[in-house]
Image (tube, rainbow, N blue to C red):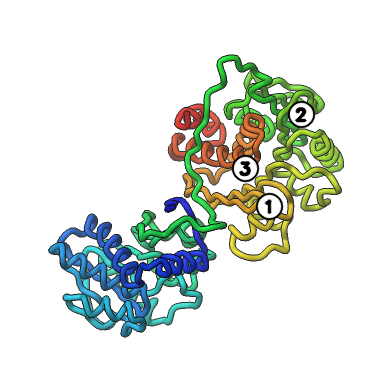
Amino acid sequence: MRNPDQILSVAQMRAAEDALTAAGTSVEALMDRAGRGVADWVWRIAGRQRVTVLCGPGNNGGDGYVVAQSLLERGGDAVVVAAGEPRTDAARNARALFAGPVLDSEAIVQGEVFVDCLFGSGLSRPLAPEHVALLARLAQSHRRTVAVDVPSGVDADSGAFLSDDLPACDLTLALGAWKHTHSLMPAVASMGMLQLVDIGVTQQAGAAHVLVRPSLRAPEADAHKYRRGLVAVVGGAMPGAAGLAAEACARGGCGYVRLSAPKAVRTSHAIVQADKPDFTKAKAVLVGPGLGRDDAAWQKLHDALGSGVPVMADADALWLLGEKGPAGLTAPAIITPHEGEFAKMFPELMGNKIERARQAASQSGSVIVYKGPDTVIAAPDGRVSIAPRASTWLSTAGTGDVLAGLCASRLGVTGDPLQAACEAVWLHGEAARLAGPAFAADDLVAHLPQAMAACL
């Protein structure tokens, strides 16, 4: 069964392609599918205007020859710049079938679209300087740049740049399945629009997945505030952060929010406030935003983790856990670390962000929401979802508190930490889209009901 939302490592993609060839699909047939699928997109952009396809020596270059030939067959204007002779049988066959001009890498060309088929997803070393210069020259002499599978010079597993000064793309066309780099910083920020070209790859075991819009339900006809879920929010030294999280929590679908803080906070009248934490009837506890890092804060975190209620931990709670360790307490159901908090809690973990999130979830027993412009959600059983790129306006104070409140609210509603985390991250991104530019965290909260409505 095909799954357009799966995200594969290089090794998983090779296994998927091997499975197709073992089932009787030739490498040449896969190359033809890939190249013609890419040509469909390039034709939409360029039509009959000049397209230059840069072909490398491997099968990615072979895809490029198919792209160029398909454009010619449609009446387009396509030339190939060859950065070396084809080195695989399939690539040599594709070149032999190309009826247009093949230029060397010194040729001066310009046009509407430059298609980068120099190297594919298997590249793991820096590009030669002459290849970096060639990519830059062709990108500069064309109005738009399209990368096939991954931009040349990008590590497909880590999202790292293997070389400096690589040109940005207007469109990146993933072949067969998304690769890790199509979700991970820093490379994804330079890929432009992302589209998937189907070549028949089926579902692969252990694949990560793109986070998709959740399907939510309105409360039942006989619902009441306790059945919908009571969430206890534990405040501390900076109660404003807890108050903001409580506001998001109240708009995330739960039925009752109880906020404890050392002093009163200006919140909606519907949020009940008290001096001390009260976990009675709670379905979820939120602790961390504005908690502080002193002994009193540790005691509040200790009490929350010992309450017998699923805990959503963020901010100062994560710093305390990284400093003191879990101390034999029940693990939080969900934790939401940013890069610095993750490094403090899991300093020994290696690999790309997906691999580290998966390891951290297994090690901690918590669902991990590894925040950032490339947010990764991992469960202890190995399941991973990666959020699509959200508004860059989220990079402002307080938006993490809003996400924490959403996670706690959805945890109180669903009782399922992974489901709650996935729903919260999607709602957070949708609220940011609806809020438009230059919003503050309070504006994000105001758009949560509309984000919820998009999922009903």
Q: Are marks 2 and 3 in contact (CB under 8 Å)?
A: no
Residue type of the residue flagged with mark 1: Ala
Q: Which mark is residue 361?
A: 1
Mark closest to the chain's N terminus, 3 or 1: 1
Q: CA distance from mark 2 to mark 1?
A: 30 Å
Residue drawn at point x = 21 percent, y = 66 percent: 70
| Residue at image mark 3 | 418
Drawn side of residue 286 relative to residue 268, left or right: right
Residue 345 at x, y = what percent?
Answer: 73, 54
Mark 2 to mark 3: distance in Å? 28 Å
Does residue 136 sit above or below 423 in this rendering? below
- Give percent across and percent down for residue 209: 51, 51
Observer able to see residue 157? yes
Residue count near mark 3 (Cα–Cα under 10 Å), binned few <14, some 14–19, many ≥20:
many
**At numbered mark 2, what does the secondary structure look like: helix, strand or loop?**
loop
Front in this rendered view, residue 157 or 435: 157
Amino acid at the residue labelled 3: Leu
Q: How much space separates mark 3 and mark 1, taking CA atoms?
A: 11 Å
Mark 2 or 1: in front is 1
Where residue 68 sits, quadrant-wise, is bottom left
| Sequence-wise first label, 2 or 1 | 2
Q: Residue furthest top?
A: 222
